[in-house]
Image (cartoon, rainbow, N blue to C red):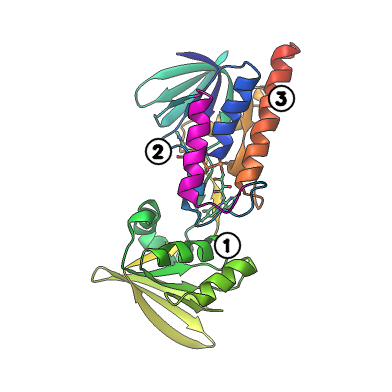
Amino acid sequence: MNTKVAIIGAGPGGVFCSIYLKRFGIDSIVFEKKEIGGLIRYANLIENFPFLKPISGPNFCDMIKKEAESNKIRVIFETVKKINFKNKFVITTGKNEYFSDYLILATGTEPVIIKEAKNIKKDMLSFWENFFYIKNKEVGIIGGGDVAFDNAVNLSKRKNKVTIIYRGLRCLNILKERCAKDKNINLIGPAEIKKIIKKNGKYEIIFKQKNEEKKYSFDCVISACGRKEYYGGIKNIDKIISYRNLKEKFFLCGDVKNGRFRQAINSISDAMKIAMKIKELEYEGKS
Ligand SMILES: Cc1cc2nc3c(=O)[nH]c(=O)nc-3n(C[C@H](O)[C@H](O)[C@H](O)COP(=O)(O)OP(=O)(O)OC[C@H]3O[C@@H](n4cnc5c(N)ncnc54)[C@H](O)[C@@H]3O)c2cc1C
């Protein structure tokens, strides 16, 4: 199948790339391996969008989905596995091959797992994947940023007992206040994680606080120690990123390139910039 623009990832960045391109009359396909909406689904409450009342992550994702449907953008639910470039981009999923003139990578991020937790990395990733099914559990969250505190409030709503263990506090005051008021949330810090051990189906976090070593046991442990760019696990993507002659054919959009400035609104702003750039290249004959 041929398209002018192939977009990988149907988070806010990828979906709005396709919507803005459509407004310019440019055809695109979005590939998504899970659901429309991306990472923001995990947000307890989104409060930083202009003109929008505070809204939960899942409801925000429903809005993105409706926007995608009403603009009739094409989303293909296949995981992109490999990309080559031979005059056109050749996009290989497990099922089909697609061809495009432009490629946009909007694949987001993946969680950073601290070295003390490397032995339970698989379990941590699975807790993150199953976040919405965690109910009535003892949950340990490692981290002191917005995501740790936002996750804690979200988990508390589903009757989990949550303990946040942090080294330093970097989160918004409003989130700190919400957690401090919540009876299901216990804050421990500053503390240094020493070890995490899996024992009898539970997870023991051993940490040091004020020179004293302590041990807490949890049903599951969530890592909220930052995230790093994720290139979709796609074969050959490093080559595509490094090819200088693809500079005006290949674009990174959103969290995958935004470093410390990872916010949905920045991903959407990237989407607009990239769509305008492609329009310029197409209509002004620069491509
Ligand atoms: C707990 C939490 C709370 C947050 N709260 C806010 C907030 O209040 N306000 C705000 O603005 N931002 C918030 N964010 C940040 C926001 O979620 C991100 O900035 C935003 O989702 C980034 O959008 P994106 O499109 O760049 O990437 P993502 O949303 O990460 O989307 C990437 C998409 O690519 C797909 N994908 C990856 N690889 C492949 C592949 N090989 N093939 C097919 N599909 C693939 C993924 O499945 C995913 O759907 C929050 C984040 C978290 C974790």
Give me the residue at 68% from left, 21% from top.
Answer: 278
Mark 2 / mark 1, whichever is N-terminal = 2
Mark 3–mark 1 distance (CA, rounded to whole Å): 33 Å
Mark 2–mark 1 distance (CA, rounded to whole Å): 24 Å
Give how far across and how far down residue 272 sits, in percent: 67, 31
Q: Amino acid at mark 3?
A: Lys
State the residue in front, 57 or 86. 57
Taking 150 as reference, is 85 above or below it? Answer: above
Whether residue 35 is visible, yes or no, is yes
Q: Amino acid at mark 2?
A: Lys
Q: Residue 174, located in which quarter of the rendered image?
A: bottom right
The residue to which callout 1 is attached is: 146
Q: Residues within 10 Å of mark 2 (few under 14, many from 20)?
A: few
- Indicate left or right for 53 with 110 as reference: right
Q: Secondary structure at mark 2?
A: loop
What is the total number of numbered labels drawn onto the structure image? 3
Q: Secondary structure at mark 1?
A: helix
> Mainly helix, strand or loop, the magenta region?
helix
Give me the residue at 63% from left, 26% from top.
Answer: 20
- State which quarter of the image contains the N terminus: top left
Give me the residue at 47% from left, 34% from top.
Answer: 234
In the image, farthest residue toward the left = 200
- The magenta span reads 52-73
In the image, the residue with mark 2 has its CB under 8 Å from the nearest atom of ligand 1: yes
Mark 2–mark 3 distance (CA, rounded to whole Å): 28 Å
Give how far across and how far down residue 109 sits, in percent: 53, 46
Q: Amino acid at mark 1?
A: Asp
Q: Is residue 114 magenta?
A: no
The residue to which callout 2 is attached is: 34
- Indicate left or right for 77 with 47 as reference: left
The residue to which callout 3 is attached is: 277
Label 2 with label 1: CB-CB less than 8 Å: no
